[in-house]
């Protein structure tokens, strides 16, 4: 066990802190590749629950102490605004799972689509060079010696 006096616990770091610190550098480097909605999400997350969005001043009736509650950004990408909703949704989906192992099926069709596209490129190259399709059948269509096909891939 780690002795707390040797290694004191670090303060909680939120996503907003990371976005405030590294967001400008990130957007200057990758901004041209980002969608406007992604830039807006970073901006909203950085401003969430800060003075930038405004807030309300509350006063305790008993001790007369005042404090601010800043407005949230309400962006769907913000974990501070929608983190609890996301956790609740995940818990509901996990409750629907059966008590067994799950496997992700990988279809041969999905994996062979790359091969089909590659073979289509080879066939197109052959047609461009020779002006003729191959005589063997491919996919669901049959190829003839002229530049036409009976059915599509």
Image (spheres, rainbow, N blue to C red):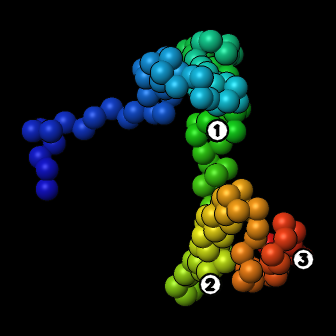
- Residue wearing tag 2: 98
**Quarter placement of the C terminus:** bottom right
Q: Quadrant of residue 36?
A: top right
Work out whether residue 43 can be spotted: yes
Residue 24 image label: none
The answer to whether marks 1 and 2 mark residues whose Cβ atoms lie closer than 8 Å is no
Q: Secondary structure at mark 2?
A: loop
Q: Is residue 100 left or right of residue 22?
A: right
Between residues 74 and 3, which one lies in front from this camera angle?
A: 74
Mark 3–mark 2 distance (CA, rounded to whole Å):
46 Å
Q: Mark 3 vs mark 2: which is more N-terminal?
A: 2
Dot 3 crowding, Cα within 10 Å, few <14, some 14–19, many 20+: few
Instruction: Name the residue rendered at 14%, 50% in the picture.
Output: 2
- Residue wearing tag 1: 77
Mark 1–mark 2 distance (CA, rounded to whole Å):
29 Å
The answer to whether marks 3 and 2 mark residues whose Cβ atoms lie closer than 8 Å is no
Q: Is residue 98 left or right of residue 145?
A: left
Dot 2 crowding, Cα within 10 Å, few <14, some 14–19, many 20+: few
Q: Quadrant of residue 136?
A: bottom right
Q: Secondary structure at mark 3?
A: loop
Q: Mark 1 vs mark 3: which is more N-terminal?
A: 1
Dot 1 crowding, Cα within 10 Å, few <14, some 14–19, many 20+: some
- Residue wearing tag 3: 150
The image position of residue 15, as x and y in percent, is 48, 33
The image position of residue 140, as x and y in percent, is 80, 81
The image position of residue 20, as x and y in percent, is 48, 20
Q: Secondary structure at mark 1?
A: loop
Front position among marks 3 and 2: 3
């Amino acid at each position: 066990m780690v002795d707390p006096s040797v290694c004191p616990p670090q303060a909680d770091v939120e996503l907003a802190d990371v976005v405030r610190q590294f967001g400008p550098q990130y957007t200057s480097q990758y901004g041209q590749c980002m969608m406007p909605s992604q830039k807006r999400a970073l901006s909203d997350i950085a401003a969430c629950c800060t003075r930038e969005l405004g807030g309300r001043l509350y006063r305790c009736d008993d001790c007369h102490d005042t404090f601010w509650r800043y407005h949230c950004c309400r962006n769907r990408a913000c974990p501070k605004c929608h983190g609890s909703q996301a956790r609740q949704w995940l818990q509901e989906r996990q409750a629907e799972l059966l008590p067994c192992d799950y496997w992700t099926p990988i279809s041969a069709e999905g994996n062979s689509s790359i091969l089909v596209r590659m073979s289509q490129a080879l066939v197109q190259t052959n047609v461009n060079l020779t002006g003729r399709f191959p005589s063997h059948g491919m996919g669901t269509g049959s190829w003839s010696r002229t530049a036409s096909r009976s059915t599509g891939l």
